[in-house]
Amino acid sequence: MKIKRNVAFIATCLVGICFIAFAIFVILDLHMPNAKNRDVIDSAKYVGFTENDSLYTAGDLSYLSFDDLIARGEVSNSFRYIELNLQNLPESGAYIFANYSENGLEFTEINKDGIKIKNGRNILKIEKKNIRIKTLHIHFPKDVSFKITSLKLHEHMPLRFRHIVLFLLLCGIWVWLCKIFIIKENLNFGHIVNFKKYGYLLLSLVKRDFTLKYRRSFLGILWSVLNPLFMAAIITTVFNNLFRVRTEHFPVYYLTGSLMFTLMSDATSGALTSVLGASSLIKKVYIPKYIFPMEKCLFAFVNMLFSFIALLIVMLVLGVSFKPTILLFWIPMVYVLVFSTGVGMILAAVNVFFRDIGYLYGIWTVAWMYLTPVMYPQEMLPQSFRNVLVFNPMFHYIDYFRKIMMYNTVPDLATNMTCIVFSLSAFAVGLVIFKKTQRKFILYI
Amino acid sequence: MITEYVVECSDVGVTFNMSKEKLSSLKEYFLGFVKGKLMFEEFKALENVTFKVEKGDVFGIVGFNGAGKSTLLKIISGILSPTNGSVIVRGSIAPLIELGAGFDMELTARENIFLNGAVLGFNKKYIQEHFDDIVEFSEMKDFLDVPMKNYSSGMVARIGFSIATSTKPDILIVDEILGVGDFKFQEKCEQRINELMSGGTTVLVVSHSLGQIEQLCKHAMWLEHGKVKMIGEVSDVCSAYKNA
């Protein structure tokens, strides 16, 4: 029995680690440096830069030509990242252009969004995916001396130190989770049977919340549709006139974002107080406690579906064409639901012991909303900020939803993987924390 | 024939942490945590409780206030988990610990019957089938669509009892609930419990009314300060308890 469990433990750990590695690589477009597909040229050897004059005093364009390299098969030309190692560079900026046309007149500026070229290792991304770069031009200010120590070209983003740290951290968390789940708690599947039994309870509770929400109001359920409509009207007026945000179909842009975000914030803040709110039940009858945070999340989900009708109405009024991709609308919704259930379970469990979480989370939700491009276009953010945005799960979900609703694109596998990884890891962590602490709930509520 | 035990408690103990002084700030909490002793005073609600209940038995539990009777019932019905020891329960439980747990006073009785049924683990079909029986038994037909907050406590208890006993459970846990309602309904309740008993249901009863215990039960247990003082035939236990 013990050996069996250890095998299960090791196997789950390995699977998890592979999964994490895969996820990180997909999210960050990383590339393991192995000999086979590493496209590297050492600058010093090729055109423009020779070992003798690797110390430059440049005022004009210095350039590298790749044509002969590609002809010799040394560079595959599908590179997207340039790794540049510089020394003795002064403070003021340098520019890098890539020329991708035959006549040498069409340039793409690689470090345009304020990425400063600094001393040491620089990793620059070429935005356009499928262009053949002919030459690479590096423009430095006049009368400066500097040194190019190396220049490499990569197909994928090269591995950096912080990626390894992130990887090890996630692996650590995963192993810890496995240890709790498999070694300490006996992994059993009784829960699934239990879930079936209490499924009707889940639905009844959602129904109860729904009837109570609109009892004694004249318009009743209609408020779920009207509320987002009014919000969209207000926000559009404010942002179009006051902040002069010019986005095409701004009301739709805002509603798609706020729909996803409200689903998350309603679900998690509902779940936050769910266990405490159900204290009278928990003290008197045996019910699996995870029902309560789950119920609040489902309730928020049902509400969101009504807001979705509002979104469709706005789209119809503004004349946004309905594309077939809209039929995929439920995918990001389910992602967000799973994600918020996980976060909600963490919050519900922690809130039993520390009531401060309720206040803290209220503040955090406001901050989170402004950190996510719900009301403003994502291009407004500076590049440095956008790099951090990839770690915000809500950004991915909202982006996914907008792609489907507004831009008629089906997100690729990498985007889907990113969303799934965020959702499932939040759910897994939530489940473990909830399961570990639920025995003690009754003593604190 | 081998006797079948439906409830088996072995060496069950429950310890509560009674916070001696309220830990008001995070700093205090961390200090306490670092020192390795959060200032909790332990209170043993139950200690080394061991007993078995046979299938079909009616088992009474007596004791003074605060002896741990309700805690024990909560452990058997799974609401609380014991700090140490183990509890084995074979079969489905209908806990009549507090009638109408999960009633939402804003909802009508009709909605509450479905909600409370779901809380007790019934599915929709089952409740629909038994809805008429439940209403019939509670005699509340005229008030079905009135919000529960307008009900009297006796009326709430009637509905609660009707739902909880609409099923035929393997184990019925009864905690002081026969004191609700008028005498006519009490008689009806006792009759329903007797019906269930004759159908093979095991019943656990907690009551301060010794007369009721002696009338219903075969065996009884006397708890004092969380420990078992006596287990045996109901007449022996009751007479010992009376003289205490």
Image (cartoon, helix red, strand yellow):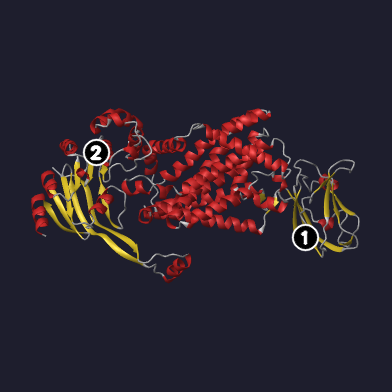
* Local SS, label 2: loop
Dividing the picture into quadrants, the one containing residue A229 is top right
Q: Amino acid at mark 2?
A: Pro
Most foreground residue, A77 or A441: A441
Of circles 1 and 2, the one toward us is 2
**Residue B95 appears anywhere in the view:** yes
Q: Amino acid at mark 1?
A: Lys
Q: Does residue A165 appear to the left or right of A120 in the view shown?
A: left
Mark 2 — on which chain does it sit?
A: B
Q: Does residue B171 appear to the left or right of B220 in the view shown?
A: right
The quarter of the rendered structure image containing the C terminus of chain B is bottom left
Residue at x 9% of width, y 58% of height: B243
Instruction: State the image coordinates of residue A98 (x, y, percent, origin top left).
Output: 83, 47
- Tell me how far mark 1 sits from mark 2, CA to CA: 75 Å
Q: How many marks?
A: 2
Instruction: Assess whether mark 2 and mark 1 are in contact (beta carbons under 8 angstroms).
Output: no
Q: Residues within 10 Å of mark 2 (few under 14, many from 20)?
A: many
Q: Does residue A139 appear to the left or right of A230 in the view shown?
A: right
Q: Residues within 10 Å of mark 1 (few under 14, many from 20)?
A: some
Mark 1 — on which chain does it sit?
A: A
Instruction: State the image coordinates of residue B157 (x, y, percent, origin top left).
Output: 26, 40
**Residue A323 appears anywhere in the view:** no
The quarter of the rendered structure image containing the N terminus of chain B is top left
Q: Which residue is mark 1?
A: A118
Most foreground residue, A263 or A426: A263
Q: Residue furthest bottom?
A: B35
* Local SS, label 1: loop
Most foreground residue, B169 or A130: B169
Q: Which residue is mark 2?
A: B169
